[in-house]
């Protein structure tokens, strides 16, 4: 099912770029011209997107030979050849931009995640992603987080209870929200609640929450919160966490840190596709 959905997404992405045809390549390159092309890493990076590299041509019914030299999650040094294609030049040229756009995005997420995870070494804290992902590409963006060494939070609204500030605003209180969730959802689903103060934290603990999300707590508040949660519930810190402060937060003793930045703000990596030879035409 994933393959089917992925092919649909790739076809739509290519249609957006190609439209009724690649007029430049069709004017300059003969239909039967063959070429060899490579994907080059122009910076150090963590690879994510091997599925895209291998499937983009088969998804549009084109026969292009493909060899990938690294695996997802591998550290790739600047100047390395990530993959090689052999096939019709027109076909490779019309796919180039979409292919690189996607790879630069997914590798960017994996690379930024790896940098964050490295900051957590020596602590017991794990890095989680969020739902702040590109619509329709969540599966591959969350996969990129795993390739970078991070862990996935819930995938969507359907696979975990996370009571947030707007739920509490509608229901009326943290306690009532937790109690309602406890009474209505399956007993195997854990109930996590977002709190923004020590008072709300105490209310969540008394109501029987399984896990708490400490939203935008300062370091001193986090220390107090972790002390209160210890041995009772798992605690997750979130809000404004990035490379510059993630280690400081982790050293407080939280079980998890969730960061939207690893998906919504990860810088794209620098990749290129280069034609290394051609024949025919």
Image (tube, rainbow, N blue to C red):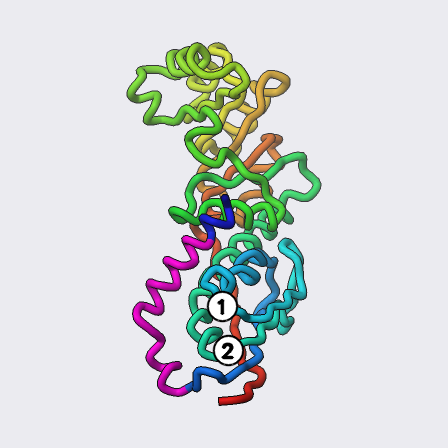
The percent coordinates of residue 16 (x first, y second) are 33, 63
Q: Is residue 92 visible?
A: yes
Residue at far right of view: 122
Numbered mark located on residue 89 in the image: none
* Residue at image location 51% in from the left, 50% down from the top: 3
The percent coordinates of residue 153 (x first, y second) are 52, 35
**How crowded is the residue under tag 1: few (<14 C-alpha within 10 Å), some, or many (20+)?**
few
| Residue 160 is a magenta residue | no
**How crowded is the residue under tag 2: few (<14 C-alpha within 10 Å), some, or many (20+)?**
many
> For the magenta stretch, what is the residue range?
7-28
* Residue at image location 63% in from the left, 35% down from the top: 125
Give the structural element (helix, strand or loop) at label 2: strand
Give the structural element (helix, strand or loop) at label 1: loop
| Residue 22 is a magenta residue | yes
The percent coordinates of residue 219 (x first, y second) are 52, 34
- Looking at the image, how many numbered discs can be counted on the residues? 2
Q: CA distance from mark 1 to mark 2?
A: 9 Å
Precedes in sequence: disc 1 or disc 2: 1
Q: Main secondary structure of the magenta part?
A: helix
Q: Nearer the viewer, residue 64 or 71?
A: 64
> Which residue has dot 1 on it?
62
Q: Is residue 103 visible?
A: no
The percent coordinates of residue 266 (x first, y second) are 48, 54
Q: Is 249 displayed left or right of 24 in the figure?
A: right
Q: Are marks 1 and 2 in contact (CB under 8 Å)?
A: yes
> Which residue has dot 2 on it?
88
């Amino acid at each position: 099912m994933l393959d089917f959905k992925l092919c649909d997404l790739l076809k739509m992405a290519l249609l957006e770029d190609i439209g009724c045809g690649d007029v430049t390549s069709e004017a300059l390159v003969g239909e039967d011209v063959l070429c060899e092309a490579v994907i080059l890493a122009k910076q150090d990076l963590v690879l994510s997107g091997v599925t895209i590299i291998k499937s983009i041509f088969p998804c549009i019914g084109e026969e292009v030979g493909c060899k990938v030299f690294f695996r997802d999650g591998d550290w790739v040094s600047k100047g390395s050849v990530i993959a090689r294609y052999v096939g019709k030049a027109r076909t490779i040229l019309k796919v180039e931009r979409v292919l690189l756009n996607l790879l630069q995005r997914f590798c960017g997420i994996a690379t930024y995640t790896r940098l964050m995870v490295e900051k957590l070494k020596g602590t017991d804290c794990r890095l989680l992603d969020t739902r702040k992902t590109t619509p329709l590409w969540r599966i591959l963006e969350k996969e990129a987080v795993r390739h970078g060494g991070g862990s996935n939070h819930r995938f969507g609204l359907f696979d975990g209870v996370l009571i947030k500030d707007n739920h509490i605003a509608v229901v009326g209180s943290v306690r009532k929200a937790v109690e309602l969730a406890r009474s209505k959802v399956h007993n195997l689903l854990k109930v996590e609640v977002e709190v923004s103060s020590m008072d709300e934290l105490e209310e969540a603990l008394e109501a029987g929450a399984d896990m708490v999300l400490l939203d935008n707590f300062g370091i001193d508040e986090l220390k107090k919160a972790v002390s209160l949660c210890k041995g009772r519930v798992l605690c997750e810190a979130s809000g404004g966490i990035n490379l510059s402060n993630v280690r400081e937060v982790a050293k407080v003793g939280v079980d998890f840190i969730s960061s939207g930045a690893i998906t919504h703000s990860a810088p794209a990596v620098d990749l290129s596709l280069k034609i290394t030879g051609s024949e025919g035409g």
